[in-house]
Image (cartoon, grey):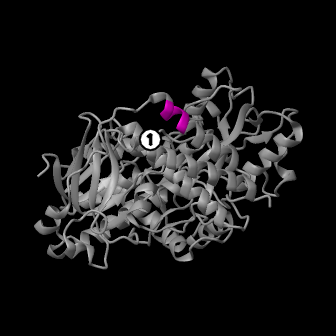
């Protein structure tokens, strides 16, 4: 047997808000949990980058109003059952977990009174925040709780390669002839040791985040390459709504210089009174939508692109010099310091901004309990399609969704953790050791960088903010060729993290492009000019 096998009740892949909440709730119920993250610590991923806040409820709010706002932002392509589940149960779970259990210090007037902000698409102020680093503040509390829980084994610098399934991997015929395909863990690459580990689990939770980094310009962390989508697709789980990619309208612009990650200027800045203006200082959003600067993100993004096309300018500006309800340096310290470091004092000069890929509204299809179409596999967070977002996400619903589905998946798995669902010795023995594709060391960093450049440029230019049949066909053909060439070239190359990431990213780009080609209707984030 392989020396690098590990057995656990539940394997959680990803350490953001969804993965951490799932792991904590499972561990508190007595489950043996193994949580893996590709980063050096639990702070990798997108949750820590979330600036604006998390949807709660204010005094002049109710679930019906929130439901209406979500449906309007999502072009009524939302799954109503999931929307109502979020609207009714989300704030209750937030109170129970983030406030009561983990004491996240959201901005408050006193012990019983919160400060609320409003963002685009919201009809009332209902968003809890911690200045402009809400995600980081949440993760500070969750990572502390995870690290202190004796039932959670945290493995860092681990990259999941493939999900283990009974149909694809089990060698015993009893499992191959069983009509139910089941996920029983994952092949995992230990970057520190350069070795592949087998983690066998009764249940697996994918919480790998989004895929924004398959685009040239993105606000996402380097880990957001769609690894969960790629693995779930290969394992046979159903994906849904992959064409709906939300582009955030306001990422910081610094000339022709390219960033590894575009710095996000939170929508909450507009919620506090900032206005989008063109190079002439003209506020233009009212020409495109009656809600002006507080229109949903897909509308604001396209309005900016139309304005840039009309004026020929490289960027627009977010004017924070007047009309703000609070001192910007106090309310948005992270954004203020970032802009100041680039020579822009947002108290006196507008911020140059452009759109960038931000959030995936589609993903691995799950129900309200976090179940996927593959037995024993659950998923939560941005890698999923719950149906909440429909064709476009309402601002600040993502943290609430990740928290709620992580919690719900844990509750459902806890009910099933019994003798019936324990992995049998027969099944564990039927899972083969990892077989390296070969020992020809032809991995070349320059070639990998070029492959990534091809993926990101193709997705940005052809599967980006504005799409057409011709562009999508070109993307499909280019990515199909790239995928074939990659498989041919690396087939006999020893496994490594750069190669794993490249394969995940290429396959995600390919399936997103296919989804965009299939959907002929122009709605929300999927905007087709033809």
Report the number of numbered marks: 1
Q: Image point 48% across, 38% down: which residue?
A: 222
In the image, is residue 299 above or below residue 440?
A: below
Depth order, front residue of 108/381: 381
Q: Is residue 282 visible?
A: yes
Image x and y of residue 40, in percent: 33, 35
Image x and y of residue 496, in percent: 34, 38
Image x and y of residue 359, in percent: 57, 51
Q: Image point 63% across, 27% down: which residue?
A: 339
Image x and y of residue 256, in percent: 70, 26
Q: Which residue is mark 1?
A: 489
Q: Which residues are magenta?
A: 447-451
Q: Does the magenta segment cover residue 76?
A: no
The residue carrying pointer 1 sits among few (fewer than 14), some (14 to 19) or many (20 or more) residues within 10 Å by Cα, namely few
Depth order, front residue of 384/65: 384
Q: Quadrant of residue 344?
A: top right
User: Does 301 sit left or right of 130 as displayed?
Assistant: right
SS majority, magenta: helix
Q: Image point 40% across, 33% down: which residue?
A: 443
In the image, is residue 436 above or below residue 343?
A: below
User: Does 295 sit left or right of 71 as displayed?
Assistant: right
**Secondary structure category for the residue under label 1:** helix
User: Does 356 sit left or right of 363 as displayed?
Assistant: right
Q: Quadrant of residue 281?
A: top right
Q: Is residue 246 visible?
A: no
User: Does 488 sit left or right of 453 as displayed?
Assistant: left
Q: Quadrant of the C terminus?
A: bottom right
Depth order, front residue of 159/269: 159
């Amino acid at each position: 047997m392989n020396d690098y096998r590990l057995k656990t009740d539940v394997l959680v892949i990803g350490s953001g808000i969804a993965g951490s909440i799932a792991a904590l709730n499972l561990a508190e119920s007595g489950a043996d949990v193994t949580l893996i993250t590709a980063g050096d610590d639990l702070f990798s991923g997108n949750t820590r980058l979330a600036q604006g806040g998390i949807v709660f409820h204010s005094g002049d709010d109710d679930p019906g109003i929130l439901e209406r706002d979500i449906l309007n932002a999502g072009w009524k392509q939302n799954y109503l059952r999931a929307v109502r589940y979020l609207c009714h149960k989300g704030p209750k779970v937030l109170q129970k977990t983030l406030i009561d259990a983990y004491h996240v210090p959201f901005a408050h007037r006193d012990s019983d009174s919160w400060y609320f902000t409003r963002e685009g698409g919201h009809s009332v102020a209902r968003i809890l925040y911690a200045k402009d680093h809400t995600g980081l503040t949440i993760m500070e509390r969750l990572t502390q709780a995870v690290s202190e829980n004796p039932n959670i084994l945290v493995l860092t610098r681990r990259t999941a390669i493939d999900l283990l399934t009974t149909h694809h991997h089990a060698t015993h015929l009893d499992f191959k002839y069983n009509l139910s395909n089941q996920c029983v863990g994952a092949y995992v690459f230990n970057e520190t040791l350069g070795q592949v580990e087998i983690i066998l689990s009764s249940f697996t939770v994918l919480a790998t985040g989004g895929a924004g980094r398959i685009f040239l310009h993105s606000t996402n962390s380097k880990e957001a390459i769609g690894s969960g989508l790629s693995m779930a697709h290969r394992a046979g789980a159903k994906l849904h709504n992959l064409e709906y990619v939300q582009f955030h309208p306001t990422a910081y612009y610094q000339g022709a210089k390219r960033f590894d990650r575009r710095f996000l200027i939170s929508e909450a800045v507009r919620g506090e009174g900032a206005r989008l203006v063109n190079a002439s200082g003209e506020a233009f959003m009212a020409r495109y939508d009656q809600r002006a600067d507080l229109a949903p993100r897909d509308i604001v993004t396209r309005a900016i692109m139309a304005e840039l096309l009309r004026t020929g300018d490289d960027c627009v500006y977010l004017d924070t010099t007047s009309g703000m309800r609070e001192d910007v340096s106090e309310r948005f310290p992270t954004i203020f310091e970032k802009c100041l470091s680039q020579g822009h004092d947002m108290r006196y000069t507008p911020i140059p901004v452009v759109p960038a890929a931000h959030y995936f509204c589609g993903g691995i299809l799950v129900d309200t309990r976090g179940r996927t179409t593959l037995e024993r596999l659950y998923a939560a967070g941005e890698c999923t399609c719950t149906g909440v977002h429909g064709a476009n996400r309402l601002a600040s619903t993502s943290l609430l969704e990740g928290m709620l589905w992580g919690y719900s998946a844990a509750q459902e798995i806890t009910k099933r953790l019994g003798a019936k669902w324990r992995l049998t010795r027969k099944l564990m023995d039927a899972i083969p050791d990892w077989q390296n594709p070969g020992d020809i060391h032809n991995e070349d960093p320059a070639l990998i960088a070029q492959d990534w450049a091809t993926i990101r440029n193709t997705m940005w230019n052809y599967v980006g903010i504005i799409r057409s049949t011709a562009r999508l066909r070109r993307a499909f053909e280019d990515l199909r060729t790239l995928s074939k060439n990659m498989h041919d070239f690396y087939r006999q190359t020893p496994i490594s993290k750069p190669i794993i990431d490249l394969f995940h990213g290429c396959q995600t780009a390919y399936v997103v492009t296919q989804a965009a080609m299939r959907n002929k209707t122009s709605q929300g984030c999927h905007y087709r000019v033809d």
